[in-house]
Amino acid sequence: MAIAEPIARESLAAAAPAAPSAPRRIHRPVLPKVLTDAATATAGARWASSYAAHAAAFHLVRVPAYGLRLVTLAPRGAWRAVRAGAVFALDLDGRPDYVTARRAAANDPARLVQLVEHRRDMLARRRMLLGLPLVVLLVGAVVGWLMTGPALHAAAVAALVALLGVAEARAARVPVTKHAADVVESPPLSFPVLREALAACGVPNLRADAVRFPEDVTRDGAASRAAVDLPVPAAAVIAKRSQLAAALRRPLSCLWLEPAPEVHEARLIVWALDRPVKPRPWPLLRSGEVNVFRPVVVGVDQLGRQVSVTLAGVHGVCGGVPGSGKSAWLRLVALAFALDPRASLHIIDGKGGGDFGALAPLCTTYVAGDEPEDLDTVAATLRGLQADMRRRYKILRAMPNVVKVTDELATADPRLRPVLLLVDESQVPFEDKARGAELAELTADLVRRGRAVGVHVWVGTQRPDSVSLPTPIRSNVQLRFALRLMDSDSTDMTLGTSSYKAGYRPTVFGRSDVGTGWLKGDSDDPQIVRAAFVSPEDAEAVVRRALAAREGVERPTLPADVEQAGSVVEHLAALWPTTVDRLWCDDMAGMLREAFPTTYGNLTAESLGRLLRDHGLPVRKVNQTRDGRRYNRAGMLRAELTTPDAVTL
């Protein structure tokens, strides 16, 4: 008997039928979003209440005009009522038919008698139906008139006039009131409307019959949302945003398009807003403090919902053409850091304007301009921050199981408080022939290593390229904000490689979209954000609050020049006269300003006192004799001046 050979496993697998491919399914929510999303419900309720309040006020102020119009219509309404009663009681509208029937029955006496009796009975019933209520109404009106006063008489006459006027207006189709709002003929977002609009955009190979809608059109907040599967990449339609808005008969600011590459490259999300999103005031403009380790409100999305970002532990870049709102965004970031009493700020404004002037009083370093002495200060600041970063890593290495600066650690240890380095118009310092390469490398080093130890860098430029955003900087930042840009290269420089191809195109923003851009890095997907605008005047008020909040916080206010001596303690130890046992802060600040003008050019006695306290040195009242009199001022004793491993910012 022949023995069957074993069948290979591979052969069995090949012979087995292929499993049916199950389509991916995205479950729709059980309940509509208006019942589960507070923002959507709030937006609907806000719209309804706003419209009701507006309509009530609109019609209230026009009540006299409406009354006059009803008075003019009332006589015709009375005549129309009398005429209708007569037609009903005398059957005037049926008389032609009656006459015709009598002529037809002229040769049939029985039929003629039947017609006459039927008409006589019908007219009797009609007069009864009309006359009895009129008699009751008339008697009631006379009794009521005799039993009431002038106020009710006037109300009754007004009601009668209004009733007759409204009856005439309806019969003649004459409007009594005016519309409280003009209706803009924008068709509701629907599948047929959207399909025709997409076909009219002029995108090659986009046929209307190839467009698919995987989801129903839904309401989300104050907008309608539609998901569309296209026969072309979504980026091709995003580039035609203005044409699509025209086809949908909507303002450009009311139509926003987003790709959905997590589904597939042809998935497009269409947002049609009820009205353009207006700029919202910054919630922290009048009150409140900031913890940069927690989310901070920076603006709203295209639906008007608040957008928050966490500024600690990340670096950022911002790119945008002149006038797009780049400096305003960076000023907002600086103000957020300023409202955290622990943070110190170093602002370098390559443009040299006044965009950040309001922040100067609380900045550790503030440079505005591109003069040689300005760039010298920038270089000294960056070197000081680099040295501080190294010292911070040394501090962390001495702590068990600590790898980065946390919120609690920044509060507990003054040496590890948050630091912001903000460079606006980075192309100015980075393009300098003498120092540009060094400044770019120092900034890149802070970007690469500073995040974990609480040193945060934000760089802004109106011309994103390899000089203003060198590769080590743009490859290591986490937050990216792209305002209006002009081409794909600058988009990829700001948002990251292939962002333009993926459909994130700040090139579609117009001049009216100031402060609006793509924000990438704080959420799973890039999102459109309209930044909160804080004017320079309002920024001054915020800075005053920030200064008041910092009065009880001891912090250094100027960086130490590490090239010359090291920390401020070492500077004082080198300058202190050997024959003097005590000095006031005024004297010490003067010595530092004279010896190191670049570093301590703006140092005051109060600032020096905060620096010394931050280094753990006692600043007390010191007695000295001047001009034959003894004075008691803040200062130090030489015996208390030591050189610990101090931290400089």
Image (cartoon, rainbow, N blue to C red):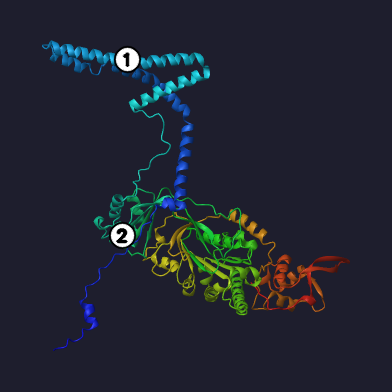
The quadrant of the rendering that contains the N terminus is bottom left
Tell which circle, 1 or 2, labels the residue nearer the N-terminal end.
1
Q: Nearer the viewer, residue 34 or 126?
A: 126
Asked whether the residues under the numbered discs 1 and 2 touch, taking CB atoms below 8 Å apart as contact, a structural biologist would say no
Mark nearer the viewer, 1 or 2: 1
Q: Residues within 10 Å of mark 2 (few under 14, many from 20)?
A: many
- Dot 1: element: helix
Q: Nearer the viewer, residue 330 or 577?
A: 330
Q: Which residue is mark 1?
A: 128
* Left or right: 11, with 395 as reference point: left
- Dot 2: element: strand
The quadrant of the rendering that contains the C terminus is bottom right
Q: Residues within 10 Å of mark 1 (few under 14, many from 20)?
A: few
- Residue 514 image position (x, y, % from top left): 47, 55
- Residue 23 image position (x, y, % from top left): 29, 64
Q: Which mark identifies residue 229?
A: 2
